[in-house]
Structure formats: structure tokens, C-alpha cells
Amino acid sequence: MTYFGAFSLKKWRLYTGIEDLTPVLVVESSAPVHITLTEMIYRRLEKRVIHEVTVDPLRTQDGWYCYAIPYPEGLDAQLVAFTVTTGDVPATLRNISYCADAPKRRDVRIEVVTTTYRKEQQVTNNINMIREELLEKGEWGKHFHLTVVDNGRTLPDSVDAGSPSITVIPNGNVGGAGGFAAGMLHAAESGWATHVLLMDDDVTVCPEAFKRSLRLLECASDEYAKATIAGAMLSTANFEMQQEDIGMITPERNLRPFKPRFIMDREYDITFNEELIPASHTEGLYSAWWYSCFPVERVTEYGLPIPLFYRRDDVEYATRIQEKEPLKFITMNGVCVWHDAFDLRWNAAVEVYLATRNMLIQEAFTPDSHYSMDAMIQLMRDNLIKHGRRFDYASMELICDAIEDYLKGPDYYRHPVGEKLFQQARVKAEKLEPLQQIPGAPDAIDIVELEQNANDENVVVPPRDTDTAAARRGDIVHRILRKAKRTIRSGKVSPAPRQENFDRNELAIIPNDGWCRPWRILQHAGKALAVDTTGQRGAMRVRDEQRNEELRNRFEHLAQILSEDTAVLGAYRESREEMTSFEFWRRYLEEAKR
């Protein structure tokens, strides 16, 4: 029973509307084999044998043994699968498939759109795989076309190899949102495709994902004919770990996976993954655009993405659709990509600046049902305070910059300014250097051990002598009094007279990302060595309470503006229809090429 090898019986019945759908297993082998049919039911914790197969195989024209084995009717399981064992003679298996009768097949033609910026090797590997496994295979090729939007204009002319099934669009650097907009525009205007499949350039994908997507759409019931296929994201660092399979917006304004993380070499996790299906009218769900397939008619009906450059374009688009109709999703084991986990590639320009700015812009253009400016301000405040506690003042500044750039309003974003703003954020973000070049730093650090030792839940607070403990208690009282004197809502933080309660020479070593919780080891430290996931590079942060308070003051001033604003918010909402239109994007993309 495997992630790719099992047949998702319950979901196939749901998505096709064929309640009694029962598959036939077809196996070809080079020698006689013994086959056992199995099933996995969520309510049970173990795989169960359905029955042992005793039928005699047929023979193919080239002499292989062919087993065609129907599963018994009346099964009630999430998954069915099989086990193959050999006798005295080893056997090779080929052409294993599940077959079933469907009343009719829909006409489905999928435009696969990927957008890239100077990742020639990664995107070329995906182009070659799609060409060899889909486009050049007669059964599949007639259903797929590949469009590559080259934002860096660096791909060689040979990348399409003269294939009529591959289109390369040279483009200005308008980020993922602009690249996908160009591909969606091409798909809508060419008139060939019934569906568009948006896919990141830096993913690893198995051909089986495309094949299952096609069959699901061909056999979809009327209820799921316009559904979005949401591909899961598995981790390149741990190939068995599923990171996300449908995302959701929380009332606190965070983005998180709809499902918990699963390990996809565990039979129970594989089964539980197929059991978890969103309720029909669940709000705030979206399909991330690392692999997302939906009808082209959605593009003609709802328009193109908003010009966010990168991040939250997929969230906004799903929210826009849900303003008018429930958004149904199709998910299935095997429909997935492998992607670098976000917590392994911290980039403050993305995770701090773009995440903050685009949350505000996305919610201004298209608020979801739990929209709350107060909640967004509190989320940004919490993030700002945490960056300050890590002595990461550059990230605190990026949050304030993001708010100021949001307040520039939609007219500012009618032109391709995304790359310029992103580069400015990169310049301002913390710079890492080899540990050997940082005075007082070790040559290398075990990052796994560091992650375990730095986060609060793993830190044991050592006992202190009486005098030290009394001094610490005095520090705590002092901090409480200082906090009591802050006037947050006035837009200015007024600190009490400063008295240092830390050791300027005490060094703590922490991960450099914005997700770690090293509060205990930083409590009395004057410096922090922030180290990346390689354990080879880092930055020395120096505690600066005055800088912290200056940035807190700046943020609270901006927060007050946000809480009182109606003009900027209204301008974004009034501009959405125009800024997601085909006409707008044609002008925008042409301007970006100059």
C-alpha cells in the first residue's frame, strides 16, 4: 500500500459521482506471480486482505503474463491496493493500472503554465520530463500543451526543440504573479485549452500527477466539473513528508495548511490523507500555485491575478472566486510536487517584506469572510516584537517599509515596480557571511542540534543562586513597570528610564529564521549569532534596545494610520476590476519588457 500505488476508491466515487465504481487491476509480468488484493479503511488501523487471486493470466503479444483482476463489488474503503509475490522465478512488472467504466468522458485539454526567472537548469529538467512523458506520448500528448513564461529572458532557443506543443514567452521580471498572468492570458486567448495548470519552476513533479489530473477531469461529475485540482506539496528535504494539501486563511490572518503534516510511507497517513475532505461551504481555502489546475472559463469570468509580484496571488484569486460561488477542490494521493520547505529557505525580503505588504494589499483588493484590519495589525505587531526579541532589527524595519508601500495605494502598482521594491528589501535585509569571517563564531554549527537547543520548549532554565535570583526578580518587576508605562494606542511608545538587564558580552546562538522561539536563551544575552540552515553562514546581531523602541514607535504610528484609513482601502477595492482585466495586463506586461 503506497502513496502512488494505491487506488483512492472513496475519492474516485466522490469526484465522478459513480457510487458503485469498482476498479479492475491490470498487471503485466515477465513470469507468473501471486497477487493479493488489499484495502485500507480509515476506521481501522491496519491493512486488510480482500482475497487471494487465483485466476489464470492471459498472454500479451510479446509473451508477457497479463492479469486483469476485478475488485469485489460493495467495498467501503478509502484505498484499495495489491501485493505481488513471486515463486521460484523472479519477475519484472510493467504497465500496472487501475481501470473502470465511466459513462462518458469530458473533453479536457490542459495548458501547463510555468513561470521562471533565471532557473534554467530546474525549468529545463521539467520541460524535458513533460516533453518525454506527456507531449511525445500519443495517448497523452493530445491533451497537454506547455507554456513557459521566461521572466529573465535567459532560456536558450533550443528549449522548445521546435515542438509545436511547447510555447516560450519572453517576459519582463514581473514575478510569479505576472508570469502566471501572462500564461493565463495566453491560455485564454489561444482558445485551445479547457483548463490551465499553474506550476512553479523550482518543483520536482512526477508524470503520474498530470495523468491523474487529466483522468479526474475527464470523469468528473457535474458537481466537480469546475473544481480546482490542488496538488499537494511534499518536501525535497524529506521526500515522504507532505507539507500542504490545500491551504487556508485563519481568522488571525495567518496562512496554514488545511491538513496536518503526513509521512507518506505510512499506510495510516496515506489513508487519513484521503479521508480529510473540506466541507462543502468551508471558507478561506485556496490552492497554492505550485500545482493548481482549474477551468480556463474561470480566467475569462474572473480575470487575471492582481500585480503582487510574488506571494498571495493564489490566495487572492481563490478568495475572489468565493465571493460569488463555493470553490470546490479535488485532491488525491499522487497529485503532488516536491518543493523546498519554506522553513528551510528563510528569505526576509520574501517572508517579512512581501508577506506583510501583500497580506495588506490582497485583503484590500479582495477581503475574505474573516477580514479584520485589527487582526492584521495585531499579527504584524506580534511579528515585529518577535523580530525585536531576536535582535533582528532589519526585519522590524522591513515590516514598517511594507506598510508604507501598501499605503502608496493602487495607482503606484499600476506600473511594474515589483522587482525594484523586492530588490530594495533584499538590500535592507540581514546579510549572512561565512562563520569563519565572523569574530567569535565557531567554524560550523550542527543546525539540527541548534534547532533543538534554541527553541524554548527544549531549553532547561538552570537554577540560580539567591542573589542572582533576587536580581532577576527585580529585573522582572522593572520590565513590568516599563511595560505598564507604554502608551501603545497613542501611536508612541514612551519608555521608562532605561536600565540594562542583560550582559553585553553574553552570546547566544540561534537559527536566523523568523520562526524559531529562542526567548529563554536570549533573555539576558547582549549578542546573538544567527545561523542559516547550512550551519556554515550567519550574522552577528547586537542587542540595541533604543533601536528596538524607535522601530516600535514607527510601527505604532503606521498602525494608527491603518486603523483609521478608509481612503486607501477603498481605492484598492475600486481598482480591482480594472487591475485584473486583460487590457490592464497587456499594457503592464509590455511596459515591463522595456
Image (cartoon, rainbow, N blue to C red):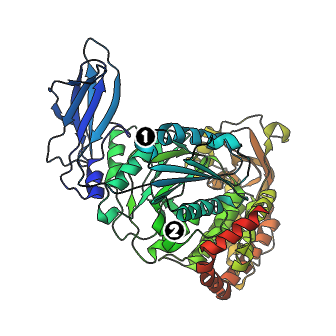
Give residue 138's mark.
1
Which of the pair 318/400 is nearer the observer? 318
Q: For residue 474, say whether it is visible.
A: no
> In the figure, residue 56 lies in which quadrant?
top left
- Residue 190 location (% of width, % of height): 55, 61
Q: Is residue 34 above or below residue 73?
A: above
- Residue 411 location (% of width, % of height): 72, 79
Q: What amino acid type should be assigned to the residue bearing mark 1?
A: Gly
Crowding near the residue tagged with mark 1, few <14, some 14–19, many ≥20 C-alpha atoms within 10 Å: few
- Residue 327 location (% of width, % of height): 41, 68
Q: Earlier in the sequence, mark 1 or mark 2?
A: 1
> In the figure, residue 270 lies in which quadrant?
top left
- Residue 68 location (% of width, % of height): 21, 33
Q: For residue 328, say whether it is visible.
A: yes
Find numbered disc 1 in the image and state the secondary structure of the residue it sits on.
helix
Q: What amino acid type should be assigned to the residue bearing mark 2?
A: Val
Q: Could you tell me how far apart the alpha carbons at marks 1 and 2 are, in whole angstroms?
A: 28 Å
Q: Is residue 41 above or below residue 181?
A: above
Give residue 299's mark.
2
Q: Give the residue drawn at x 63%, y 40%.
A: 161
Q: Give the residue drawn at x 62%, y 62%.
A: 182
> In the figure, residue 322 lies in which quadrant?
bottom left
Which of the pair 408/171 is nearer the observer? 171
Q: Give the residue drawn at x 65%, y 56%.
A: 514
